[in-house]
């Protein structure tokens, strides 16, 4: 019995020892774990209160880099994008002309080209014809004309307009064909007709206002509102001339043949080019110096009130009266401009000035290098700068409301019918104040012309004034300034209507002085 009780105590003691051995490691682990947490927390607190030098260095470097990066980004935002280098001025060597011509009218219209073209390499360009002419195999130095080229065959292109002519397709491709010649250094491709007269220096003045590295399509509209309605108010009329920058000419050459096939029903070449420009997304940049002149009759009213802009082209000179009525031919009339005023001061050609002869109560309007109008009474500048209707609409049944601009009658009263004086000579004159141009204007009377009866107590300039002399200093920088009409001053005029025999008026034209303007007398 004693042996059984001792075995039971041994089992209990063994179980207690097992529990003790199991709890001791767990207790030790818990102790060390708690101690580790306490030490880690203390170390972290100490680190936050007093960072070591390495930590400070790293944080400082990071902050400096971040600040520098932010400053650089801000500076980049403030600096404008670097512009393209400013190109040199455009010269005639940067321009190539493409002249649309017909062998049918060549012998007559080539005379206009000879007036304005500068041969022997001074200008670059080509006349594009439908077939060869006598000058085709002659040197340009001999003919005084641009080189002649024959347009490519366009018979594969569809043309369905009932009233037009297939030659429109040939003419519309002249810019592209000229571009494909690969001439070096070309900035602008300028197109016109064989009866278009260009004023080259004024053309350069206009082109230098634009960046030739950008796509530009520069020209002007028709004078006829109906023409613009039938075709487009966003189209440059080729007879008036237009300019296309090189990037745009390159884009046009790539896509034009396909474009032409999409518009077989259009009438002419100009609307085909404009249709392709619309596909390219380039609008017309209008300039009032390009003149289509879709009119008949006399250009006097239009040119005597030329816009305040350089005159770039004239067109349709075969269907209007000669610029100077006493010229032996229409080309000879144009040559009078080029031999005189264009050489002296091309920037000022046709520019209007308005002033008053207070002693005689006359209104004077000078279109420098072309004409002077003198009318009885006082007519306001607002009225005088409006073209007088000496011309007829392109659509003969249309009246004066069918123009794309304001017009006025030549005279609202028979007494105000102006005396007209046309330029007869032009020369330079040296003086103490520098070089001056002297242009002389002679009274022109139409055959069998009679002056209307007038009861005004104002001398008639037609009866008392035969010659007008205009003095003007050359002003090549005229268009470098903001547009403004020049001022004119009557230096001398016939006293008492010229009863003492003096029948000459002298006028000074130039930049308006401080406070000077065209004042209506008595206002």
Image (cartoon, grey):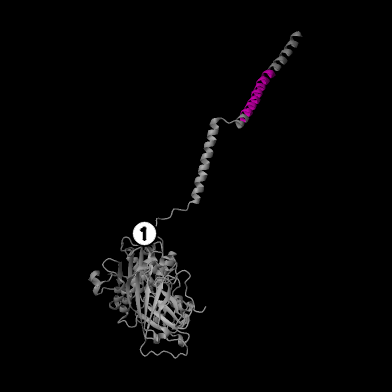
Q: Residues within 10 Å of mark 1 (few under 14, many from 20)?
A: few
Q: Is residue 221 visible?
A: no
Q: Position of residue 266 (x, y in %)?
A: 41, 73
Residue indicated by mark 1? 88
In the rendered structure, does residue 38 fall within the stretch colored magenta? yes
In the rendered view, tell whether residue 47 sits above or below residue 323: above
The image quarter in which residue 246 lies: bottom left
Q: Position of residue 349 (x, y in %)?
A: 37, 73
Secondary structure mostly seen in magenta is: helix
Total number of numbered discs in the rendering: 1
Which span is picked out in magenta? Answer: 18-44
Q: Position of residue 17 (x, y in %)?
A: 69, 16
Could you tell me which quadrant the N terminus lies in? top right
Q: Residue furthest top?
A: 2
From the viewer's side, name the closer residue of 455 and 138: 455
The image quarter in which residue 230 lies: bottom left
**Which element is circle 1 on?**
loop
* Horizontal side, residue 316 vs residue 47: left or right: left
Q: Is residue 93 visible?
A: yes
From the viewer's side, name the closer residue of 219 and 39: 219
Q: Position of residue 40 (x, y in %)?
A: 62, 28
In the rendered structure, does residue 499 fall within the stretch colored magenta? no
From the viewer's side, name the closer residue of 282 and 86: 86
The residue drawn where x is 50% and y is 47% is 73
Q: Residue furthest front?
A: 500
The image quarter in which residue 314 lies: bottom left
In the rendered view, tell whether residue 297 sits above or below residue 134: below
The residue drawn where x is 67% and y is 18% is 21
């Amino acid at each position: 019995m004693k042996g059984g009780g001792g075995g039971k105590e041994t089992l209990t003691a063994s179980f207690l020892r097992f529990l003790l051995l199991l709890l001791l490691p767990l207790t030790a682990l818990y102790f060390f774990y708690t101690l580790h947490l306490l030490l880690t927390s203390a170390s972290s607190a100490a680190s936050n209160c007093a960072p070591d030098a390495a930590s400070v260095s790293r944080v400082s470097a990071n902050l400096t880099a971040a600040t520098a990066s932010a400053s650089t980004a801000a500076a980049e935002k403030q600096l404008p994008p670097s512009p393209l280098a400013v190109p040199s001025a455009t010269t005639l060597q940067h321009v190539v002309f493409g002249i649309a011509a017909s062998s049918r009218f060549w012998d007559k219209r080539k005379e206009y080209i000879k007036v304005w073209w500068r041969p022997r390499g001074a200008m670059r360009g080509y006349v594009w014809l439908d077939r060869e002419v006598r000058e085709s195999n002659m040197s340009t130095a001999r003919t005084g004309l641009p080189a002649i080229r024959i347009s490519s065959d366009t018979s594969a292109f569809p043309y369905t307009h009932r009233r037009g002519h297939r030659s429109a397709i040939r003419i519309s491709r002249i810019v592209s064909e000229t571009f494909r010649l690969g001439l070096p250094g070309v900035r602008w491709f300028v197109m016109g007709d064989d009866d278009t007269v260009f004023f080259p220096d004024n053309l350069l003045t206009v082109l230098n206002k634009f960046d030739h590295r950008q796509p530009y399509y520069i020209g002007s509209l028709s004078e006829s509102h109906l023409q613009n309605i039938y075709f487009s108010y966003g189209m440059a009329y080729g007879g008036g001339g237009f300019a296309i920058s090189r990037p745009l000419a390159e884009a046009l050459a790539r896509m034009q043949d396909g474009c032409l096939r999409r518009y077989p029903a259009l009438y002419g070449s100009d609307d085909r080019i404009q249709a392709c420009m619309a596909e390219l997304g380039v609008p017309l940049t209008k300039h009032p110096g390009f003149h289509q002149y879709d009119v008949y009759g006399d250009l006097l009213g239009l040119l005597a009130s030329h816009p305040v802009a350089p005159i770039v082209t004239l067109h349709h000179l075969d269907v209007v009266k000669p610029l100077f009525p006493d010229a032996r031919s229409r080309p000879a009339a144009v040559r009078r401009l080029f031999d005189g005023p264009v050489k002296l001061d091309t920037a000022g050609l046709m520019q209007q000035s308005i002033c008053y002869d207070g002693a005689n109560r006359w209104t004077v309007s000078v279109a420098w290098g072309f004409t002077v109008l003198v009318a009885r009474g006082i007519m306001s500048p607002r009225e005088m700068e409006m073209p007088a209707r000496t011309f007829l609409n392109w659509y003969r049944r249309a009246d004066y409301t069918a123009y794309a601009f304001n017009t006025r009658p030549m005279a609202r009263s028979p007494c105000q019918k102006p005396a007209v004086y046309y330029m007869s000579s032009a020369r330079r004159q040296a003086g103490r104040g520098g070089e001056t141009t002297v242009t002389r204007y002679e009274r022109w009377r139409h055959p069998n012309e009679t002056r209307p009866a007038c009861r005004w107590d104002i001398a008639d300039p037609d009866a008392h004034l035969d010659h007008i002399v205009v003095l003007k200093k050359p002003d090549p920088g005229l268009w470098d300034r903001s547009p403004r009409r020049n001022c004119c001053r009557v230096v001398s005029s016939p006293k008492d209507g010229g009863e003492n025999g003096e029948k000459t008026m002298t006028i000074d034209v130039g930049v308006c002085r401080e406070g000077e303007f065209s004042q209506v007398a008595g206002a």
